[in-house]
Image: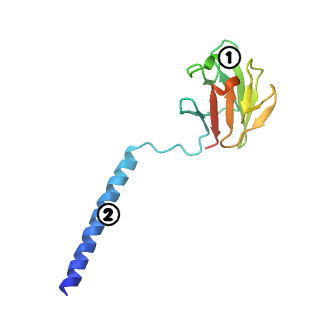
């Protein structure tokens, strides 16, 4: 009989420890911001920076500050951004599809290391690699959520 009581006591003690660990995990999770679900984004590969893609507009202009078409995604703060045109590319949202288009940039756009001719659109898929300009110096990876 005494053996059973010791086993019950050991089990109760074990579950109390697990309950405390679970409470600590819940507290930690509450302190951290929740991941943004469903938000499409780009990862700048050279700095590992995340850029959320605005979904409240059908066309997102990508480039550097200018007086003609100000960029919605400004890449001027990234290293080697001098190879990126002021009006470099557009990211278009059509339903649940995302399209990337070079708008006639000086140094070109490459999708998965393949040149994207100006005016042509490429439907983006998760993990696609987007290079603005030659030499893979300003590179992003696309994720739909």
Residue 57 spot, x, y in % from top left? 67, 32
Q: Is residue 28 above or below residue 99?
A: below
- Asked if residue 31 lies left or right of residue 74, the reply is left
Image x and y of residue 102, in percent: 75, 26
Q: Secondary structure at mark 2?
A: helix
Crowdedness of circle 2 by 10 Å Cα count: few (<14), some, many (20+)?
few
Residue 87 lies in quadrant: top right
Circle 2 residue = 18
Q: Is residue 9 above or below residue 135?
A: below
The relative height of residue 7 versus residue 84 in the rendered view (above or below) is below
Q: Residue at 74% of width from left, 17% of height from top?
A: 106
Q: How many marks?
A: 2
Q: Is residue 12 left or right of residue 108?
A: left
What residue sits right under mark 1 in the picture?
A: 86
Can residue 133 be seen at all in this image of the molecule? no
**Residue 20 in the figure: left or right of residue 32:** left
């Amino acid at each position: 009989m005494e053996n059973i009581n010791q086993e019950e006591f050991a089990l109760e003690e074990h579950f109390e420890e697990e309950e405390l660990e679970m409470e600590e995990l819940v507290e930690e999770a509450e302190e951290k911001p929740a991941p943004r679900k469903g938000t499409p984004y780009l990862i700048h590969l050279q700095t590992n920076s995340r850029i959320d893609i605005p979904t409240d507009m059908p066309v997102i202009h990508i480039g550097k500050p200018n007086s003609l078409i100000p960029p919605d995604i400004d890449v001027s703060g990234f290293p080697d951004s001098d190879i990126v045109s002021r009006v470099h590319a557009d990211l278009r949202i059509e339903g649940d599809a995302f399209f990337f288009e070079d708008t006639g940039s000086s140094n070109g756009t490459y999708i998965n290391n393949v040149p994207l001719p100006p005016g042509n659109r490429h439907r983006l898929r998760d993990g696609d690699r987007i290079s603005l300009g030659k030499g893979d110096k300003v590179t992003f990876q696309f994720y739909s959520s």
